[in-house]
Image (spheres, helix red, strand yellow):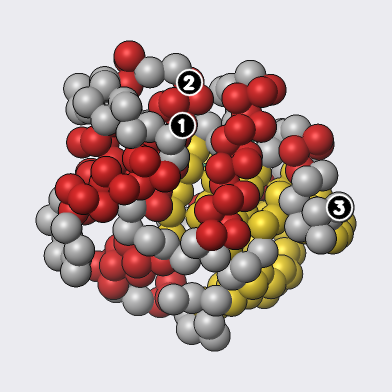
Amino acid sequence: MISRIECTNLKRYYKGDGTKTIALKNVNLRFQKGEFTAIIGPSGSGKSTLLSLIGTLDSPSEGVITYDAEEILKKSKGKLADFRFQEIGFIFQQFHLLPTLTALENVLTPLFSRKVPYNKLERAKEVLKQVGLQDKMNSLPSQLSGGQQQRVAIARAIIHKPSWLLADEPTGNLDTETGERIYELLKELNEQEECGVLFVTHDPALAAKANRIITMKDGVVLSDKVGISI
Ligand SMILES: Nc1ncnc2c1ncn2[C@@H]1O[C@H](COP(=O)(O)OP(=O)(O)OP(=O)(O)O)[C@@H](O)[C@H]1O
């Protein structure tokens, strides 16, 4: 269980069609597992890039990320996939549910071809219950509201008991009230399961409720503050 993530001098640039886009300029950040952190900033400021790097979905152009002092990105692709499976749950703005699978089947997908020391079906039912969807296990995504679909996506993200939840605008497609409920659910998971949560949002009101608020602009961290809920 990884309890500390440290980013040192992170840079990420993209080269395409002759121009160089600098998504992250020089980011230095540390995260502790118990924290609930909001990342806020204008469009294009580098929030999603930072989350992809921390989630090992992408590699920095320069700089280092360590997980409990280990440079995981240096490992082989297979080892990296195992690391992601054990440690990280992703939640996105678009729920990315498979339309022909039921809620229960969607939640089970991360466990396909994985050996785990628990009963997969029981665990899937347990997490769906945890997100308040015990009555919707056999529904298809098209039969669920946006908020319910995001709950399925959250259940899928936590089924393998990750120590970190990385959420990229999880409330971006939801109305304010539904978004607040999803926020509360993530907060509950942070408190009960002790997952570290990194939460990208455009909503300053939601960000203000986090333990820690990181503001990004033009690829740099503009501010890193303790929020009001501490
Ligand atoms: N694959 C890519 N190729 C080229 N440029 C990219 C790529 N991904 C991101 N960028 C650029 O990097 C910069 C940062 O993008 P990023 O998606 O991290 O911002 P963001 O803060 O998450 O924005 P938003 O709030 O709109 O999601 C932007 O200028 C973007 O155009």
**On-image quarter of the C terminus:** bottom right
Residue at mark 2: C-beta within 8 A of ligand 1: no
Q: Which residue is mark 1?
A: 150
Does 160 appear above or below 91? Answer: below
Callout 1, which amino acid? Gln
- Residue at 54 percent of width and 85 percent of height: 69
Q: Quadrant of residue 220?
A: bottom right
Q: Is residue 13 visible?
A: no
Q: In the image, residue 214 lies at what x, y percent?
A: 78, 54
Residue 68 vs residue 96: left or right?
A: right
Q: In the image, residue 15 lies at what x, y percent?
A: 55, 47
Kindly indicate whether the residue at mark 1 contacts the one at mark 2 (C-beta within 8 angstroms): yes
Q: Secondary structure at mark 2?
A: helix
Kindly indicate whether the residue at mark 3 contacts the one at mark 1 (C-beta within 8 angstroms): no
- Residue at 69 percent of width and 22 percent of height: 176
Which is more N-terminal, label 3 or label 1? 1
Tag of residue 210? none
For the residue carrying disc 3, how many other residues have a C-alpha within 10 Å: few (<14), some (14-19), or many (20+)? few
Callout 3, which amino acid? Ile
Which is more N-terminal, label 2 or label 3? 2
